[in-house]
Image (cartoon, helix red, strand yellow):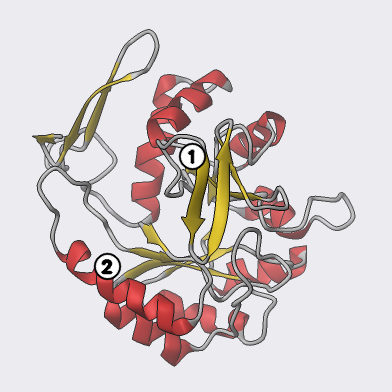
């Protein structure tokens, strides 16, 4: 999913207008973009992470207007912000998956969001309150009640021990890269929305040292998950099947008759990438 950042509304509108033709068709040799993840701007201003300070109060007409510009498949909300909890049923009815993220919500507020129809968590552990045994917060709600959540398995955003705890607690945890324009590029300065970020030693950070997205690729995510102790089949599900299931797609993320032939071929011993097929086309 093409993922937005928190920004002034006019900039988000411009991004979605530019995305619309790319969502309508797949260019030869390119990936299929399946929709938009509206990660900002409806987040808590104190849980921005690396997002710029343009958080907004959510509005159903405003979100549906953005949805008309380009199909939003997933939206991140901080359920404790004004009016957010009440919007969740209407957003679900409109076909959006609502994720809890960039949030200062309590455990109770997060549970209320799940009861209202929220179904996922945006990059679990990151940009949300830390778990405490008397104040479990969003992380506690995810571990206790979640079925699906995102996780960034770059071995920088989340400690391996926390990742293993999440794998045991959530039955369908799926990997996201959170990758930026610095991915695959040499060390140096790059743009992340309005902000300049610096890539060094495989990490992307703001000037103050805050992690600002990643340089992770999904094939490296697969290798990292196997390194953590998941079987190849489990790691493959976490990097393909579970995300497709979360989006309600029955023809993606699996090797079976009638599904699109989106296939990565890797070396048996090192899991290094050998070939890529997108919808049956070698790229």
The residue depicted at 40 percent of the width and 53 percent of the height is 246
- Residue 93: in sight, yes or no? no
The residue depicted at 29 percent of the width and 82 percent of the height is 68
In the picture, measured across the screen, residue 62 lies left or right of residue 125, that is left
What distance separates the C-alpha of mark 1 from that of mark 2? 22 Å
Q: Residues within 10 Å of mark 2 (few under 14, many from 20)?
A: some
Task: Give the x, y percent position of residue 117.
Answer: 52, 70
The residue depicted at 72 percent of the width and 71 percent of the height is 109
Q: Nearer the viewer, residue 113 or 191?
A: 191
Quadrant in which the C terminus is drawn: top left
In the picture, measured across the screen, residue 55 lies left or right of residue 136, that is left
The residue depicted at 47 percent of the width and 20 percent of the height is 231
Task: Give the x, y percent position of residue 270.
Answer: 40, 11
Q: Nearer the viewer, residue 253 or 69?
A: 69
- Identify the residue at the far front of this view: 188
Quadrant in which the N terminus is drawn: bottom left
In this rendering, the count of numbered labels is 2
Task: Give the x, y percent position of residue 84.
Answer: 60, 81
- Identify the residue at the far bottom of this view: 61
Q: Earlier in the sequence, mark 1 or mark 2?
A: 2
Q: Is residue 243 above or below residue 23?
A: above
Q: Which residue is disc 2 drawn over?
A: 19
Q: Is residue 104 above or below residue 245?
A: below
In the picture, measured across the screen, residue 251 lies left or right of residue 188, that is left
Q: Secondary structure at mark 2?
A: helix
In the picture, measured across the screen, residue 168 lies left or right of residue 16, that is right
Q: Residues within 10 Å of mark 1 (few under 14, many from 20)?
A: many
Q: Which residue is disc 1 drawn over?
A: 215
Task: Give the x, y percent position of residue 132.
Answer: 85, 51
């Amino acid at each position: 999913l093409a993922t937005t950042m928190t920004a002034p509304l006019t900039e988000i509108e411009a991004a979605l207008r530019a995305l619309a033709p790319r969502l309508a068709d797949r260019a030869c040799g390119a990936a299929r973009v399946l929709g938009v993840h509206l990660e900002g701007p409806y987040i808590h201003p104190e849980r921005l992470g690396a997002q710029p300070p343009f958080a907004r109060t959510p509005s159903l007409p405003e979100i549906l207007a953005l949805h008309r510009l380009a199909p939003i498949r997933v939206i991140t909300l901080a359920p404790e912000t004004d009016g957010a909890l009440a919007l969740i049923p209407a957003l679900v009815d409109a076909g959006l998956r609502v994720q809890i993220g960039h949030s200062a919500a309590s455990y109770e507020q997060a549970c209320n969001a799940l009861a209202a129809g929220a179904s996922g968590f945006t990059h679990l552990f990151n940009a949300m309150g830390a778990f405490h045994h008397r104040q479990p917060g969003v992380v506690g709600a995810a571990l206790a009640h979640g079925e699906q959540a995102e996780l960034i398995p770059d071995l920088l955003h989340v400690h391996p021990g926390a990742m293993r705890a999440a794998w045991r607690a959530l039955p369908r945890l799926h990997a996201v890269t959170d990758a930026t324009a610095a991915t695959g590029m040499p060390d140096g300065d790059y743009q992340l929305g309005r902000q300049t970020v610096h890539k060094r030693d495989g990490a992307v950070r703001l000037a103050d040292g805050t992690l600002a997205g990643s340089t992770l690729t999904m094939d490296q995510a697969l290798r990292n998950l196997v390194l953590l102790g998941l079987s190849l089949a489990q790691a493959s599900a976490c990097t393909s099947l579970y995300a497709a299931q979360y989006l309600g797609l029955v023809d993606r993320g699996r090797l079976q008759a009638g599904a699109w032939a989106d296939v990565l071929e890797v070396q048996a011993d090192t899991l290094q990438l050998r070939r890529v097929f997108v919808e049956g086309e070698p790229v």
